[in-house]
Amino acid sequence: MAHHHHHHLDPEAGDRRVALAVLVNIALTVVQIIGGIFSGSLALIADAIHNLSDAFALAIAFGARKIARRPATPEMTFGYGRAEIIAALINYTTLILVGFYLLYEATMRLIDPQGIDGWIVVIIAGIALFVDIVTALLTYSMSKTSMNIRAAFMHNVADALGSVAVIVAGTLIILFDWQLVDPLVTYMIAGYILWMSFTEIGPVMRILMMGSPPDLDSQKVIEVLTAVEGVDSIHHVHLWQVDEHHGALDAHVVIQKGSWGRADAIKVHLKEQLFAEFDISHSTFELECTVHACVKAPVFGEGEH
């Protein structure tokens, strides 16, 4: 099945949206931290720290988008597309550290409870919820086509849920003086951050580890290529993602006996099949005749030649 990716948003317009989202989130973080200090709410400070990580994530995403558009050079022959993948890895790793830190702080607050002003918590969290929704709207369309921006968008969704949880906690403190609900809500926020981060970091690491595209069946690729007329077998296959949207393949192809005269035409056909069936436009084939083919070569990866 072919996998086509379309980018409708102008890059410069996207950059402006991300820059605006960064400024809005930094302003919100300052307000939340001040409100958390005056109210004594750890949950509000936890939400502020998460929101600050979002601002950093968006700032890193902004820089990575700029770098990723640079052309290939003699030193960086694949270009700079993976800058966004590295940015996503940094963002998720930072979020994991934040999540564990919040678990620690919530535990300390359970051991030594503090008085909390519920009204300040509710008001600041309400403002935060509004800003989270605005930021999510700024990044939603870009999140569909960018792993990097999607990470930032997911953070904003988590922030919005965290703000709702903080509002509920503040309301319970106002109505029933349930002070322990603050660290319990912090546990919930931290738990969601960790769950989301560990879930999303896998695909990022898969790209950096040169894994095959997750929505592509490697065995099916072999079947399609070996079905091309004139192909005897294929081995030493390497299938990976150059970046989030572009797959690549290189392989040794054994040409059937008597078909060597059509070797160039067979190679062209192989490339056409790869693009038509799997949307892979970058492919490299080393052609071998049956007499001089690699011996006992594995289908995937390296082995003895």
Image (tube, helix red, strand yellow):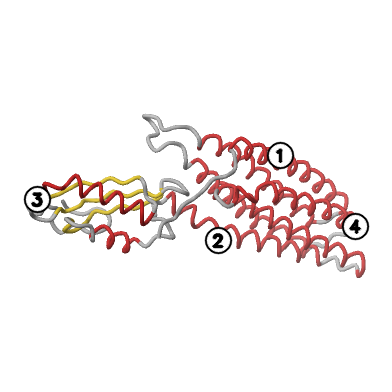
Residue 270: percent from left, percent from top? 26, 51
Gap between marks 3 and 1 measured at Cα: 60 Å
The residue beneath circle 4 is 117
Looking at the image, tell me whether mark 3 or mark 2 is earlier in sequence order.
2
SS for callout 1: helix
Asked where in the image residue 303 lies, by quadrant, the reply is: bottom left
> Where 283 falls versus 295 (above or below)?
above
Identify the residue under disc 1: 20
Residue, x 15% and y 48% (percent of image)?
Answer: 262
Q: Which mark is residue 199?
A: 2
The Cα atoms of the two marked residues, 4 and 3, are separated by 80 Å
When the figure is inspected, residue 20 is found, relative to residue 287, above or below; the finding is above
Q: Residues within 10 Å of mark 4 (few under 14, many from 20)?
A: some
Which of the two discs, 3 and 2, sits closer to the camera? 3
Q: What type is the residue that disc 1 sits on?
A: Leu
Q: CA distance from mark 2 to mark 4?
A: 35 Å
Q: Earlier in the sequence, mark 4 or mark 3?
A: 4
Disc nearer the start of the sequence (1/2): 1
The amino acid at mark 4 is: Asp
Left/right of residue 80 with respect to residue 63 in the rendered view: left
Q: Residue furthest bottom?
A: 176
Nearer to us of marks 1 and 2 is 1
Q: CA distance from mark 1 to mark 2?
A: 27 Å
Amino acid tagged 2: Thr
Q: Earlier in the sequence, mark 3 or mark 1?
A: 1
